[in-house]
Amino acid sequence: MQSPSTHPISFAVGNKNIDYFVKIRFFPIFQNITNESYKNELNKSAVADPGSNLNIYVIGGDVKNEKLSSLNLVEKSKDKFNEEEYDPFSFRQIQHPTTYGETLVNFLKSLVGTGVLAMPYGFQNTGMIIGILGTCIIGFISAYCGNTLVRCSHILLKRRKIPILDFAGVAEQAFLSGPQRFRKYSMFIGKFIDLFIVLGTIGGNGCYIVFIASNLKQLLDPVMGEHSSRIYMIAMLPLILLMNLVRNLKYIAPFSMFANAVLGSGLVIIFYYITQDLPPVSSMPLYASAAQLPLFFGTAVFAYGMIGVVLPLENDMKKPTQFLGVRGVLSIGVCFTAVLYTTMGFLGYLKYGEKTEASITLNLPLDEPIAKSVKLLYSVAVLFTYPMASYPAMQILHTYSSKRFKSGSVLYLLRVLMDVLTVFLAILIPNLGAFVSLVGAVSSCLFGLIFPPVIELLTYYEDFNYGRFYCRIWKNVLIIIFGALGFITGTYFSILDIINFDK
């Protein structure tokens, strides 16, 4: 991949002109920071110490663009200013900042998707006790890792004196703060994260397609004759291609609002069905085979896949300090979600037992109009969320393609290619339960459980502030081991389940 070129830019700082060799990493999804605000921020730093020899570098794409969203400094000022005096939030110029309540709603919408429908199947792989404990523990660790990522972002923003960073930018700056031998990999790690965000989006959208095809098969086979779910996946491809060619979020938003309304009302109906005529809890197994635990782990981590949205949501808040803390958006949102996931998993498994399907919608009766309408509306709603779920990956593709190609048609070609790959992956893995577990084990473990503690270890290396008895090191090492075990075992057993599905 072609590396971006370096562009010298001269700013008048105090009574002297200083050249800043700048590379801009541009992510249109945020559209927050202007050149003028960044110039003012640099001027403020220089005035604070006019004798300092500033040597600023930034990584990324196109200097000519007026709006920047992630400014990644490679080299700090040679005279380190007081980090506590710099407030990155005051330099953010957000067109439409979100309040605490709006951010909480957006956070819940990003969490409560198809993952909640898979929780009863997750409980089937663990039993009641491990299901309840595991759901709460994984939720706590996922929230802690999200908290870690945002805290490290704040530290790095103050240390580098820049207003905003995305996930890849935080990782790059963390590697630049770590030991000398890690710093040369900073650019690579940013591109690696971008690549896996795209691959993770393909995997997650593949799960959506399998979910829709499984529900449509139940509804349409009695009318049209029995067909493989793969036929329904292929039939969806033209519609997916048309929807995903829309680049403006303004045209996608109405479909997303409809999907949110359907998903909310659908959950209410599902809870009605799974609370009717329940057997006694004593009739259900409290534990399951240890070999099934990795499948539950992948399902739960997939459901708690929040790590990709925490920084975008925090970056767009009117008061970003309200995102963290006991009563912050992250804590309240995960607590609510943990209760919802645990309740859905417990009641769904209690209702259907060993007949629990990979999505609880597949267990709803086919002879009742309301249940059939839930299956259909859920399928349509998930289909309508597809363009929004693809949007971050599409922005990354836009960023990299615009550096190499001038024609806008290349981006549309990349969108088509991504959709075709997604459907092809779904056709290869029509086993919904194993597919969800695989995506959770690979993508969610890597980004949600392994990268955040690595980022924290590297961020604190510069000041070597690891706490008494190096507790911060031990804590992060344990989380990394936990995530790595889940990654290895979850991937292995999910692949085995996929291989055995058609046998």
Image: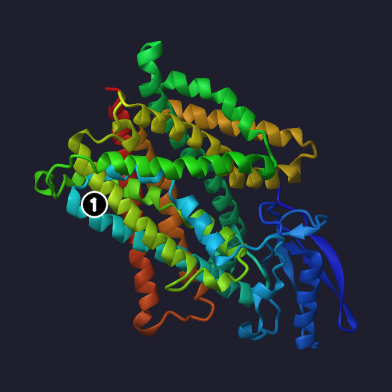
Q: Is residue 352 visible?
A: yes
Q: Is residue 160 above or below residue 108?
A: below
Identify the residue under disc 1. Answer: 131
Q: Position of residue 30 (x, y in %)?
A: 67, 56
Q: Position of residue 234 (x, y in %)?
A: 50, 21
Q: Quadrant of residue 376?
A: top left
Q: Is residue 286 above or below residue 494?
A: below
Q: Is residue 16 above or below residue 200?
A: below
Q: Residues within 10 Å of mark 1 (few under 14, many from 20)?
A: many
Identity of the residue drawn at 17% across and 42% down: 278
Q: Is residue 474 left or right of residue 316?
A: left
Q: Is residue 130 left or right of residue 43?
A: left
470 or 144, which lies in front? 144
Q: Position of residue 469 (x, y in %)?
A: 34, 83
Considering every residue shown, the one lying at the far top of the view is: 225
Identity of the residue drawn at 42% across and 73% down: 326
Q: Mark 1: which secondary structure? A: helix
